[in-house]
Image (spheres, rainbow, N blue to C red):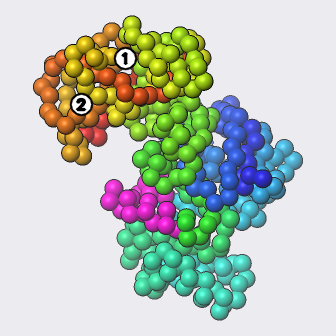
Amino acid sequence: MPHLSLRNISKSFGEQDVLTGIGLELPAGAFLALLGPSGCGKTTLLRLIAGLERPSQGSLWLDGRELAGPSTFVLPEARGLGMVFQSYALWPSMTVQGNVEFGLKVQGMSRSERKARVAEVLATVGLDALADRRPHELSGGQRQRVALARSLALRPRMILLDEPLANLDAHLRQSMLAEFRRLHAATGATFVFVTHDQDEAMAVASHIAVMSQGRIEQVGTPETLYRRPKTAMVARFISHGMTLPVEVTARDGDLCRTLLNGQVLGLPGSAAEGPAWLCLHREDLTIAPAGQGHIRAEVLGQNFRNGRYLTHVTPQGIGADVLSLALDHPVAQGTALHIRIASGWVIARDGGTPVASQGAYLTERVDA
Ligand SMILES: Nc1ncnc2c1ncn2[C@@H]1O[C@H](COP(=O)(O)OP(=O)(O)OP(=O)(O)O)[C@@H](O)[C@H]1O
């Protein structure tokens, strides 16, 4: 039996359809990231799981119990879930200890039990030395940990986190990500984490649901999304993926006979015969001697990154805009290169944007 099960959930606000046909089954103890661009419906989906919104259609189940459906609605406080918001929502006049203890008091737990539980969770999140401080005496990361400790104290089956790192600087975000991984392993609770940052999702999640325009495009492990994307949107969104328009002429099991630039390549994939996308990452592209490449291209520019030269090129004659690959040496703008495709994953073309690699290139330029 899946731990969390979302069955064909849709949600509209007035005329606006915000979520459509959401289906998802999650095992207990998973760390799920809801990942997608701004406005795709991630927070609405999290709020539906929390019980802060009611689905317009479909049903939501936790450990075999229906929490929301056409004739059922379990209130948020009766769902046994913890929620951590990006604003932390701590009580400013209470100490760290008081903030964490508050929910236990509301539950009617005895004083001695409360003290023991608070000490235990503060030790788990590494805040035992700061128990007597008030929120304004803490850093952003420490406040985030108090918010998490407050949720953990109630020993929920599932913790819901809405962009919990959005207010932290880049350095603190990295250390909090490591902290989330550790706490997830230590507590065994299921974590559901909303983010628009694919690096963040890849760094912590056991499962990622990639969302776009109110739908789930694909759910899978980070590795599956990286190596076997189902749609062009997922291929481009994960780890600066690139897509090239190709034609599949035959398929044998997992191997697609793929026509690119007048050449035939045998590549792994799921596409049937017909128009397809070849999904690529930088490491799938290498420089080849003249006559041994699959694509001719001209160098647009380079960024020095992680000890290598990230090189952006304009391919010729294949209907793609820009490709990026990592080289070990600098190359002058305008240099002609022969590029070899070492690997990739071929999927059916869905009629999406033809200028396939533009997004990957722009991302590089913006954050270079
Ligand atoms: N209570 C509401 N009433 C009306 N529209 C809403 C409501 N809540 C959300 N929406 C709309 O639903 C859409 C999805 O919003 P949501 O906050 O779920 O997206 P998101 O993916 O979490 O975005 P972001 O990353 O920017 O937070 C948006 O167009 C938003 O304006």
Dot 1 crowding, Cα within 10 Å, few <14, some 14–19, many 20+:
some
**Residue underneath mark 2:** 311
Q: Nearer the viewer, residue 158 or 254?
A: 254
* Left or right, 358 with reference to 181: left
Q: Nearer the viewer, residue 4 or 214?
A: 4
In the rendered structure, does residue 173 fall within the stretch colored magenta? Answer: yes
In the picture, the disc for residue 14 is none
In the rendered structure, does residue 210 fall within the stretch colored magenta? Answer: no
| Residue at the (47%, 23%) spot, across then down | 267
The answer to whether the residue labelled 2 contacts the one labelled 1, judged by CB atoms less than 8 Å apart, is: no
Q: Residue 282 at x, y = what percent? A: 34, 33
Quadrant observed for ligand 1 in the rendered image:
top right
Closer to the chain start, of discs 2 and 1, is 2
Dot 2 crowding, Cα within 10 Å, few <14, some 14–19, many 20+:
many
Q: Is mark 1 within 8 Å of ligand 1?
A: no
Q: Residue 322 at x, y = what percent? A: 31, 22
* Left or right, 271 with reference to 264: right
Q: Nearer the viewer, residue 221 or 39?
A: 221
Q: Which residues are magenta?
A: 163-183
**Residue underneath mark 1:** 320
| Residue at the (75%, 38%) spot, across then down | 8
Q: Residue 91 at x, y = what percent? A: 53, 73
